[in-house]
Structure formats: structure tokens, C-alpha cells
Image (cartoon, rainbow, N blue to C red):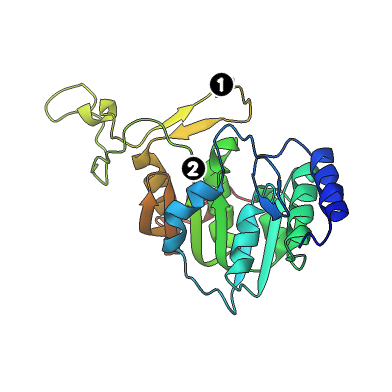
Amino acid sequence: MMATAVAAKDLRERVAELAPWFHNIDLGGGVQTAPDHFLGDYPSFKFKRFAGALPDDLSGKTVLDIGCNAGFYSVEMKRRGADRVVGIDSDERYLAQARLASEALGFDGIEFAKLDVYDVAALGEKFDLVVFMGVLYHLRHPLLALDLVREHVAGDLMLFQTMQQGTEAVLQVPEDHPFHKPGTTEPPDYFDNPAYPKMHFIEREFAHDWTNWWAPNAACSQAMLRAAGFAIEAQPEPEVYLCRVASVPYSEHGPAAVYPARGERA
């Protein structure tokens, strides 16, 4: 892509103007967006560990990348031949980074828009693949976000990742929890089991980042996905899940069992 040294110099300047970058993306011509990233070649090294869980050929498919950041996953889905890729984020600087990266790599047909995950219904369509990576733990209302994604934009598959803390073990719990252990007035022991589904609430900061609100354990991530109406088809990495749209549990109880009522008048 970088035909001349002048072009590479211009690209470096544009990259610097939009710094800092959280995605290190190789733009060609020796230009990388975050070569000194504290995690290394992120997210490329991470993606290589689970890339095989996704279809190699996305021809004819549409993709929505929620919380696209600098567009790494949007570009990777376009590389696989997706007919249409839409990346959304609530941060204008991230969107500017994504537009620059996709332009430099020759994928300027990717659509980027400023949109919050809670407003995905505004897109008015469902996508064959939803990429929902590294977003959940930044949200004040994570289960609501999953409900809205399932309800409004997830047409088939979802690639999902969240930061997790605690054990990776998963405890099998009863479908109906009793108040007490049989014959006692004490609560069931399994609530204190580290493998019980738990969502750790972070009141202030995690890794010097005030936007990190939650850290589920593995059991909680899986339970939340099921509760929102996603069937887990693969777990190629401890924090990464490939899901397929499924039926929503408890939907027979009405909308309040799935997501909050919209406040519409009858």
C-alpha cells in the first residue's frame, strides 16, 4: 500500500495524530499503530489463537463489530470476504483510527458509525455474524446489552469475549434454588463455591482504567450468554466464546424476563 517513503511518512503522521492506539495494526510500509503496546502485538497474537473457530470464508455474509475500537476485527472479517462489515463505537477517536486503518489497508468499504451498544436497535437489521469482543466488562448494564444484541442485531453467530476473573471451573447448579439447605435455616453451600456463576463488581478502577466495571468468572459468562438466548458452540480460548442464536429462557414470562420494558403506553 505504501508506494513511496513520502506516503509512509504521511501515514506515520496521521497515526501519531490519533494516538494512543489500543489496537496494534500493521498498515504496511513498516508502519504499525502501536508497536510498543504493553500487551505485545495485540490483538493480532490473541486472534491467531482462536481465528480457526470462525468460518474461513464469509462471502455473502454481513458482520457487525460492536465496540470496534481501531477496527482490527472489522478488517479481519473483511479479509475473509464478508460482503458487508459495519463497525460501531461510542468513541469518535477510535472511529477515526478505524477509518484510517481500513483506508490504509485498502478496506475503505467498511462502514463505521458512532453508536452505543444500548442503541443497536437503531441499525434496523440483523447480521449473520456479530463480533462482541472486549466490551461487556466496560458496560454498566452488561446483561441488558446482551439482551439487546440478541433481540435486535444477532442473526446467527456471535463471537464474544470478556475479561474474566476467578476460576475457570464451572459448577453445575440446580435450576431452582432453595432458600435453605434441606432441614436447616442456612443458605445452600454452593453460593460460596468459587465455581458458582459470579460477577465481580469493580467500583473504582481495574488496571488504572475506570471503565472496567465487571469481571465475571467463566461460569457467569456462560450463564449470562445462555440467559440472553445464545448457545455456546465453541470456547477456543478461556475468555472467548463462539455462540449461535438460540431460544431465550423464560421468554414465556413476557418481556420483563428478557429485557426491561420499554415504557411504551398501551
Residue 26 position, x and y percent, is 66, 51
User: Mark 1: which amino acid?
Assistant: Glu
Label 2 neighbour load within 10 Å: few <14, some 14-19, many 20+: many
Please tell me the numbered disc located at residue 61: none
As drawn, is 145 to the left or to the right of 235? right
Residue 207 position, x and y percent, is 56, 24
Please tell me the numbered disc located at residue 203: 1
Indicate the quadrant where residue 127 lies: bottom right
Residue 206 position, x and y percent, is 55, 24
Q: Quadrant of the N terminus?
A: bottom right
Q: Nearer the viewer, residue 76 or 64?
A: 76
Q: Gap in Å between the C-alphas at discs 2 and 1?
A: 18 Å
- Residue ID at (70%, 66%): 124
- Secondary structure found at label 1: loop
Q: Is residue 244 above or below residue 162?
A: below
As drawn, is 100 to the left or to the right of 67? right
In the picture as drawn, the residue positioned furthest to the front comes out as 5
The answer to whether the residues at label 2 and label 1 have Cβ atoms under 8 Å apart is no
Residue bearing the label numbered 2:
162
- Residue ID at (48%, 37%): 163
